[in-house]
Amino acid sequence: MSSRRRFLAGSAATLGLGALPVSGAVGAPTASAAAARTPEDTTRPPNLVAVLADDLGWGELGAYGQKLITTPRVDGLAAEGLRFTDAYSTAAVCAPSRCSLLTGLHTGHATVRANPSGAQGSLTATDTTFAQVLGARGYRTGVIGKWGFGPESADQESHPNARGFEEFFGYIDHGHAHQYYPAYLWNNGAKEPIAANAGGAKGAYAPDLLRQRALDFLDRHAAEPFLLLLTPTVPHAPSDIPDTGAYASRSWSAANKGHAAQVSLFDTLVGDIVDRLRALGLEDDTILLVTSDNGPHEEGGVNPDLFDANGPLRGYKRNLYEGGVRVPLIAWGPGRVRPGTSDRPTPLTDLLPTLADLGGAPAPSDVDGLSVAPLLTGGAPAARHDHLYWFRDERGVTARADTQDRQRATWLAEALRKDRWKAVRFAPVRDHTLPDDQWQVELYDLATDLGESSDLASRHPARVAELVALMRSSWQEQYPRGAFGTCP
């Protein structure tokens, strides 16, 4: 038995998770892979797959009310699994959102708190990702798609391989990920040229390449517990896609047709993952999560209002109103995830402790996330956050987002939700130490005003003061971390 297999089997016994499969080396899949599995394999820790869309709005899936774009595969998972109504990204743009998702730290504590403006935002050696946590438990780990943290080089601490992912295929750089027909993608520490796209040709569509690598990852690791983070770039702008399919005959703009087709492509991609899990006999051994990094975009001529992409919510990508940060979240796992819906306010910082809990691994004690594993499995109620916090330091601006912010889209901003109350505030200068009385503060009651249309700040000054104080306590210029694997 390999040392890795001995570790898996030993740690499973220690944690009371049962025996793990020990036969078969990692390699090319065989037709008998599923048949070779033994009954005791069902007691192994679950395989964990998270699929993260790029700029998919809360209302862009049929399960969340979408009418114009068809998403039957994800809708089916929502019907069979657990659908969260109040899930949140931890930022209104992708880089800080993805940093928080990986590390379990909200944007008042995380290393990357803004989209790149000049120098590429980077993770550091102090950033512990859920891949490191699960990898230490014995999981095979891979990330395929958009990483989004630079610099674009192999030997540096922000590279996926340095942050716990054994296998990486995709884009390192935030800007590079905007190319749907790239001349190269990264394969671990090396650039892999894409000959079909040489010289500006459009011969190979990147989401198709990412799809195949993801399926290959499942095939190669079917015999052992694995963690796969799949981060396709759809439906981020530009709305570039080889075929607009069912939307080609619509009287929409080319950008809107392409956007709709990209959302449906994301749906198909998720369905392909499910189909491969079933073909490998892993359906009952896997928990799948589907979510997005922030609210819907309007770049490249896309009109999110055509699709009602934010549903009843106010705001878009870049806004700290609900439409910018509330996202779809679906958990699916036959026999492992209880079906239903949950209105628990659930930020994506919860992924790290949840995945650790599901995999039987101890999570770092200094993260902001809380495990929702009991909620997924139908056991004891999951712990609830006292409040949720968002920080924004964004220099990019788009028209609709700026209108929602009343021309303050480039202002420093914060938001906080506590129970039914949501406060949003804006600083007229880019200085977080600005005295509280110089910020512009708004207050909303989400229980009666989900669309955040009625500012109640003047009627509830004590509530405003309470939430602003929580904002102050939630943000730290530097957030010292304990080293991964050490006891507090």
Image: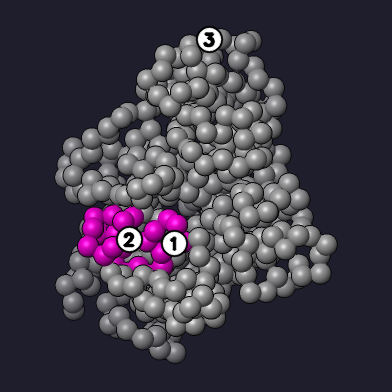
Q: Is residue 5 left or right of residue 390?
A: left
Query: Which residue is rendered at x = 63% and y = 24% of the image?
Result: 445
The residue identified by callout 1 is 176
The residue identified by callout 3 is 462
Query: Quadrant of the image for the C terminus?
Result: top left
Query: Which residue is rendered at x = 36% and y = 54% of the image?
Result: 149
Q: Earlier in the sequence, mark 3 or mark 1?
A: 1
As helix, strand or loop, the secondary structure at mark 3 comes to: helix
From the image, state whether disc 3 or disc 2 is nearer to you.
2
Please indicate, yes or no, whether residue 180 appears anywhere in the rendered image: yes
For badge 3, the amino acid type reads Ala
Q: Is residue 25 above or below residue 295?
A: below
Query: Which residue is rendered at x = 31% and y = 29% of the image?
Result: 477
The residue identified by callout 2 is 152
Question: Mark 2 and mark 3 in contact (Cβ < 8 Å)?
Answer: no
For badge 2, the amino acid type reads Glu
* Of residues 306 and 277, the one drawn nearer to the viewer in this rendering: 306
Q: Is residue 371 above or below residue 278?
A: above
Binning the other alpha carbons within 10 Å of mark 3 as few (below 14), some (14 to 19) or many (20 upward) gives few
Q: Considering the whole magenta stretch, tell me its main secondary structure.
A: loop
Q: Where in the figure is residue 4, as x and y percent of width and height?
A: 21, 71
From the image, state whether disc 3 or disc 1 is nearer to you.
1
Query: Which residue is rendered at x = 60% and y = 15% of the image?
Result: 457
Query: Quadrant of the image for the N terminus?
Result: bottom left
For badge 1, the amino acid type reads His
As helix, strand or loop, the secondary structure at mark 2 comes to: loop
Q: Earlier in the sequence, mark 3 or mark 2?
A: 2
Instruction: Tell me which segment is drawn in magenta.
Output: 150-177
* Of residues 42 and 234, the one drawn nearer to the viewer in this rendering: 234
Q: Is residue 149 left or right of residue 481?
A: right
Q: Which mark is residue 204?
A: none
Q: Where in the figure is residue 208, as x and y percent of width and height?
A: 53, 75
